[in-house]
Image (cartoon, coloured by chain):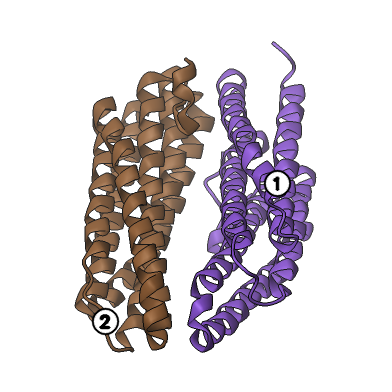
Chain colours: A purple, B brown
Amino acid sequence: MRHFSIELEELNELLLRMGSLVESSIRRSVQSLVDRDKELAKAVMRDEPTINQMQVEVDARTTRVLALNQPVARDLRFLTATLKINTDLERMGDLAVNIAERAIDLINRPPIRPLEDIPRMASLVQNMLLKSLEAFVKVDADLAQTIFPADDEVDALRDKVYTDLVAFMQNDPASVPTAVDLIFVARNLERIADHSTNIAEDVIFLAKGVDFRRAVTPVHPV
Amino acid sequence: MRHFIEELEDLQGRLLEMGTLVESAIHNSVRALTERSEALAQQVLGNEDRINHLEIEIDDLAVRLLALQQPMAKDLRFLTAAIKINTDLERMGDLAVNIVERALALMNRPPVKPLIDIPQMARTAESMVRKSLDAFVKREPELARNVLLSDDTVDRLRDSIHTELISFMQEDPDAIPQALDLILVARHLERIADHATNIAEDTLFLVKGVDVRHHLERNY
């Protein structure tokens, strides 16, 4: 059997590779919408099985490491965080595919207005994902904290997209299918941001040994 | 410390308690919508804290058992399944709260149309949640497979609700905010069904030791 610390390092690398593929899926899904590039949207959909396969592999390896090494304390918290982050990353991949599917619908219809807020949301969301993963590998709670203001900004943009597009549809009922798709794209981006927030909360738990979800109550000593 | 088997039973009991709370949150959230009942909506909001608290308790217990008992094989699979199911249940509780938020927004506006498909979708989703937990507790793979099949029904209902409401909005632009709220409710229900599907898949993994997510099982 290989050394435990090598196993952990490999697991880290696998999770990071998955994270960068997910980040690229998010970027390309919104790019395909902005550029009206159907091929790019399809490329995102073709990458989904790879992300799914990585999720299954991360789960299988984490469970194996748990079983064979019987880790305690910090390593145990790292491994349980890995299980959670893995789930978050896979969901983000699904949401990027949803955006790509909407993009294909939208490309088939005439554009209704220039896209400004959605690309802005996308760049915030990609940055949140990269930062939350960096915070995870460095176990850096301060870095994890820095993504929360971006999450508020993403929420505000989602509300703005909604309000603007409802007004737009009411003036021009023919635009309803397009506007509804765009509202859903904004929602999917907001959900992706929420998953990065989950990762940041897991990092804070990992770094401090406290569950951030309930402020500062200590967990059972392990 | 208590015997390991008792601890595992305790963990399963708490997951079931959480499952019962989540099932009733889903049920009441849809009733709040169809009956325009603010009291039912408040009831769901009032139970959210209890669900969130249980999630943390279950997580702590599962992690403690992983650390202290160094379980192997089937017990290890049970504990990792418990951690995942816990997350799914908590997310379903959040989705029930999201439905309640839409229900409260809709109560402040005149009703736009009779609700038929959404209650039907809710019944299917609720039954999936119940069956998936039942399959988990009884370790019944057939019941779990049954849940996987219902997911397609829920997806079809969601699509037909979506199409219907899009044409509704075009005919009556004043009803656009209400129709968008209803489209969201359908999406929340679809997500609840997805989480029940996750629980069914985790159950199959637990019983068979094979990962059936993403339809990988045909490769084995």
Residue A32, position as x, y percentages in the image: 71, 55
Q: Residue at x 25, y 52 (%)?
A: B126
Residue with the most extreme top position: A1
Callout 2–callout 1 Cβ contact below 8 Å: no
Q: Chain of mark 2?
A: B
Relative placement, left or right, of A202 versus B22 is right
Instruction: Work out whether A25 lies above or below B24.
Output: above
Relative placement, left or right, of A217 versus B200 is right
Q: Residue at x 67, y 55 (%)?
A: A200
Residue B101 visible somewhere in the drawing:
no
Amino acid at dot 1: Glu
Q: Residue at x 52, y 82 (%)?
A: A169
Amino acid at dot 2: Glu
Q: Which residue is mark 2?
A: B38
Q: Residue at x 48, y 26 (%)?
A: B69
The quarter of the picture where residue B107 lies is bottom left
The quarter of the picture where residue B98 lies is bottom left
Residue B48, position as x, y percentages in the image: 37, 65
A131 or B116, which is in the foreground?
B116
Element assignment for label 1: helix
In the rendered structure, find residue A126 and report the number of the disc placed on it. Answer: none
Quadrant including the C terminus of chain A: top right
Relative placement, left or right, of B137 versus A156 is left
Q: Which residue is mark 1?
A: A39
